Amino acid sequence: MAIDSLVIIALAVTAATHAVVRNRRERARRARRLRRLPRVAIADFVEGQAARIVGRVIELETFPAPLSRRPCVAAEAIAVSVSLAGIAERAVGKSASLVRDLRMARFLVDDGTGIALVEPEGAEAVLSARRVLRRDPEGWGRRLLVRCGARAGDGFRYHEGAIVPGATVAVGGHGVRETAAELEERAEDDDLALDAERDRGAAGAARAAAPTRPGAPGGYRDGPALRLTMRSSERAPLLVGDLRAALR
């Protein structure tokens, strides 16, 4: 093998390793931020503070996870180049060594003291990669690469984490209190296709299954009390995760 080829492969391996290490560091940083936020009940959440809530996911809408096609409200898929030939090919700019795809929908979180609305815009995720594919027999991974603008090819390993309806999730960041009327008005202004009756039914079922504390705010959009909405702020993005340490 020519020296030039060896140099290209060495640079490619270094670049691929750097991409993987950088992704792991960023993920670890997000996980630390989420874990270190103080955990509070939805009923006790103070507007303007940065805190973490933990509860059960109630879906408003779902989408299929990119690899497993499971109905979910949040999904993260990562494709990592693992073959030497693939790494060398990507060294000359034909593709990326690591591709990350994150998608999230609006959903509710019920912790037994109240129900919070989670807005996905600008949010980041720290999800457990419970599904790892070393092969791509049905072409899901290739479609993921194409959708992310990367060149599809062999030699990738695919990781997927997803949050499904009914799962326990941690959401960290800033929250605001809004009235039911304000939520309805904003939903109309933003042209958000939410089924209000389905929303009320889901919230009512959740509250019936888990009694609230005396004096705690009601469910999402029932009554005149203020409702908690979690969303990204200018200071920090919202963090959504299902890592065990963040659920404690």
Image: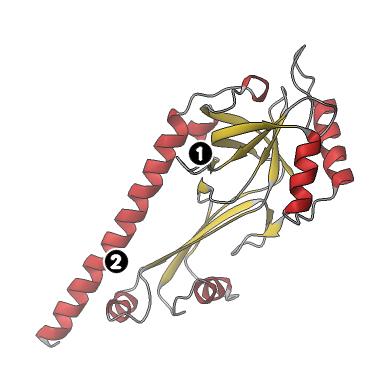
Q: Is mark 2 on a helix, strand or loop?
A: helix
**Does the image show residue 185?**
yes
Query: Which residue sits at x=76%, y=38%?
Result: 182
**Rendered position, 195 above or below 155:** above
**Rendered position, 244 above or below 146:** above
Looking at the picture, how far across and down is residue 153, in whole percent? 44, 80
What residue is shown with label 2?
16
Looking at the picture, how far across and down is residue 189, in whole percent? 75, 52
- The quadrant of the rendering that contains the N terminus is bottom left
- Residue furthest top as drawn: 214
Looking at the image, residue 153 sits to the left or right of residue 64; the answer is left
Separation of disc 1 and disc 2 at Cα?
26 Å
Query: Which residue sits at x=75%, y=54%?
Result: 192
Residue kind at label 2, given as amino acid type = Ala
Q: Which colour scheme is used?
A: secondary structure
Q: What element carries label 1?
A: loop
Q: Do the residues labelled 1 and 2 touch (CB within 8 Å)?
A: no
What residue is shown with label 1?
243
Query: Which residue sits at x=86%, y=38%?
Result: 200
